[in-house]
Image (spheres, rainbow, N blue to C red):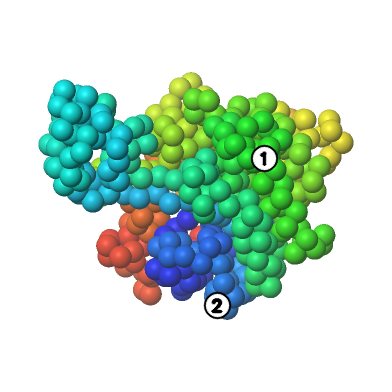
Amino acid sequence: MVPWRATEDGFVTQDNLDWYRRFAKGQPAALVVEATGIRDIPSGPLLRISHDRFLPGLQKLVDTVRAASDGRTKLFIQIIDFLAVKRRPDPAKYFQRFLEITKRHRLAIAELTEDSSWISAGEASVRAFLKDAPDDVIERALDEREIESLRFGYRERVTDTHLPHIRELPQVLPAIFADAARRARTAGFDGVELHYAHAYTMAGFLSALNNRDDEYGGPRENRARLPLEVYRAVRKTVGNDYVVGTRFLGDEVIAGGNRIDDAVYFGVEFARAGMDYLSISKGGKFEDAEQPKIGHAVYPYTGQSGYECMPTTRSDERGPFGRTVPLVARIKHAVNAAGFITPVVATGGITTFEQAEAILQNGEADIAGLARQALADPDWFIKVKLGRGDQIRRCTYTNYCEALDQAHRQVTCKLWDRKELDEPGIALAEDGRRRLLAPNWKA
Ligand SMILES: Cc1cc2nc3c(=O)[nH]c(=O)nc-3n(C[C@H](O)[C@H](O)[C@H](O)COP(=O)(O)O)c2cc1C
Ligand code: SF4
């Protein structure tokens, strides 16, 4: 879970160490470090593993988790690539600066105004015209992507193959992922998790919306090609005695996106290729995200796909609980039927021991993963182990933590961040009003 605690240039901070120490004290069997960037480019306070200069901090993180869990917790790191997403612009600025004025705009305005002099109009007058034009005119003068850039902010896609850096992704990404995985092994992590889920680059390749005209788009086997090439490059670099898993979507929950049949195909192919585990998520896409405010970036956890990714109590009769499990079960059964024993991880709305145990006993998944419930109570795991489930602080799934993530503010949980604020030596959030870590469990 991204807690927004790295430095602006992606280094591990004391707050990061404390965050993972707090989870490790609860002794989960495995802990996956937040989505960590593999490219050496500025990406705000998100962890990075994009250069060897990040190794000392990451090594410290590994040592911290080992010590706090008494060596009982395996530590993996999730590695991610993402494409450019710009904030929603102020419309005046968009028309004055960002929109690239072309012949198409001049022709459209000429047609709309029935005035052919627009065909040879200067750029400044075209910009001024569009800036003051009503919505219906804008909708006819701009193409779909330009309207999206105006109303949501510019966002790249893997299908933008007219851009050289997007066309070349299949040539560059395997080596970048492999270098990051090598660093993960050097730093002492027990494994890497390839982030092929949600709204990011690799999920874009897997998506049914990926209609690239090269061998990396179109039919399923083409869409799986780059994810498999990345995996093979990673495997070649880290060797066979190292854990390489992936997180991908059981359903994209967007119009025209992947459904469970696609996910089953990918799961079987990933298992066949030798991946060590498959962690299944759902949704979390840009395509159906809500319109952001001006100056804010679109957030992929706001639409229906976002709801299915991090479901809240505002729900249907199933509630936020285990909504991904039927998809996980389908993938697990197909993987097993194809002759593989690759563990499949269920995540999403898993909150009680009984629920987690039933999922495993029913053969629906091999491993249960908890995100928000672990944030609500990092001691969930040890409490369950010791038979102290009655003392667990239950997540209420109202997504206060997700709202903090959306605002790029340090993530905390509403069940504990105002508690015992007078405790000596505790770290507070930048707003000075919230503790950054759950209070210690007094058993
Ligand atoms: C604050 C926050 C940060 C998250 N960061 C990540 C992340 O870095 N990588 C990832 O795969 N999922 C991330 N997720 C999604 C969770 O892993 C998980 O799929 C989702 O919250 C549903 O599971 P849950 O009901 O156990 O929380 C994040 C969720 C939250 C609330
Ligand atoms: S803030 Fe709310 S949704 Fe998030 S972990 Fe805490 S109780 Fe759960």
Residue 160 placement (x, y as % from top left): 49, 43
Residue 207 placement (x, y as % from top left): 58, 35
Residue 313 placement (x, y as % from top left): 42, 32
Rendered residue at 33%/38% (across/down): 146
**Res 346 visible:** no
Q: How many neighbours does mark 1 have within 10 angstroms: few (below 14), some (14-19), or many (20 or more)?
A: some
**Res 334 visible:** yes
Rendered residue at 66%/56% (across/down): 174
Q: Is residue 104 left or right of residue 159?
A: left
Rendered residue at 76%/50% (across/down): 276
Q: Which residue is mark 1?
A: 215
Q: Is residue 277 left or right of residue 159?
A: right
Q: Amino acid at mark 1?
A: Glu
Q: Is residue 423 left or right of residue 283?
A: left
The extreme right residue here reads 339
Q: Is residue 195 left or right of residue 14?
A: right
Residue 22 placement (x, y as % from top left): 52, 63
> Which quadrant would residue 151 be assigned to in this image?
top left
Q: Nearer the viewer, mark 2 or mark 1?
A: 1
Q: Which residue is mark 2?
A: 53
Q: Identify whether 161 is placed above or below 416.
A: above
Local secondary structure at mark 1: loop
Q: CA distance from mark 2 to mark 1?
A: 35 Å
Residues at marks 2 and 1 touching, judged by CB atoms closer than 8 Å: no
Q: Amino acid at mark 2?
A: Arg
